[in-house]
């Protein structure tokens, strides 16, 4: 065990510290003590499989963090820097990712049911087989993303940019059998097939 510190990404001030075997254990310790990790610097950390349900990582630096298989349901991730983050098989149901930057993130088989991604940057993201049922993707930039076999049932896509996306075998149908809200969305160069 060693003294691990989690610092504020902007001013270097100490957010949380303690004796832990790994940064994952330190983050779990912070969560257990109800400490807010808002604006935390966690770049390149391995948090795979961690139970981070309802954690506050608003504005945190999570670049290239491995969150594969992690439970982030109900997490606060608004404005977080999450470029190249690994979120395959992660549970992000109900998470708030408003304005987060997830450029080049890998989110294969991720559960984003009811997640809020309004205004997020999801450029060149791999969302293969992701569940985005009832997710809010209003104003989201998804250009060049791989969205094969993802479920967008009842998702809000108003003002979203889907330019050059692969939407092969996606479900874009509501319960009423209509395309969800995509008024003003950019579908230039996209491949889309709605499930029947």
Image: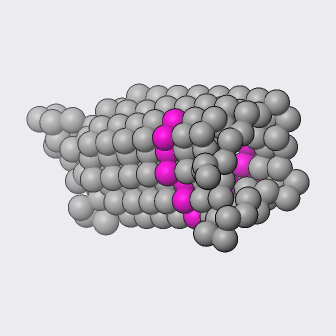
- Is residue 23 highlighted in magenta? no
**Residue found at x 55% / y 32%:** 126
Left or right: where 60 falls relative to 55: right
State the extent of the magenta-drawn residues as a range.
128-142
Q: Main secondary structure of the magenta part?
A: loop
Q: In the image, 135: left or right of 140?
A: left
Which color scheme did the rendering employ for the protein? one colour
- Answer whether residue 37 is visible to the viewer in this image: no
Instruction: Report whether residue 25 is seen.
Output: yes
Q: In the current view of this chain or complex, which residue is farthest to the left?
A: 1
Asked where in the image residue 92 lies, by quadrant, the reply is bottom left
Determine whether, in the image, residue 72 is placed left or right of residue 145. left
131 in magenta: yes
Query: Which residue is depicted at the point 25% across and 63% down?
Result: 33
Q: Which one is in front, 122 or 184?
A: 184
Residue 196 location in percent, x, y?
Answer: 61, 52
Which residue occupies the extreme bottom position in the image? 176
In this orientation, which residue lies closer to the viewer: 177 or 156? 177
């Amino acid at each position: 065990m060693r003294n691990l510190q989690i610092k504020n990404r902007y001013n270097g001030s100490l957010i949380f510290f303690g004796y832990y075997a790994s940064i994952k254990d330190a983050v779990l310790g912070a969560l257990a003590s109800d400490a807010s990790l808002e604006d935390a610097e966690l770049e390149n950390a391995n948090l795979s499989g961690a139970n981070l349900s309802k954690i506050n990582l608003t504005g945190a630096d999570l670049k290239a963090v491995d969150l594969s298989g992690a439970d982030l349901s109900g997490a606060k991730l608004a404005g977080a820097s999450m470029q190249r983050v690994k979120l395959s098989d992660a549970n992000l149901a109900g998470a708030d990712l408003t304005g987060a930057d997830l450029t080049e993130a890998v989110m294969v088989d991720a559960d984003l049911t009811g997640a809020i991604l309004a205004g997020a940057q999801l450029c060149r993201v791999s969302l293969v087989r992701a569940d985005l049922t009832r997710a809010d993707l209003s104003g989201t930039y998804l250009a060049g993303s791989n969205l094969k076999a993802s479920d967008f049932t009842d998702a809000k896509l108003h003002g979203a940019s889907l330019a050059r996306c692969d939407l092969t075998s996606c479900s874009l149908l509501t319960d009423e059998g209509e395309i969800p809200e995509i008024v003003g969305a950019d579908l230039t160069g996209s491949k889309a097939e709605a499930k029947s």
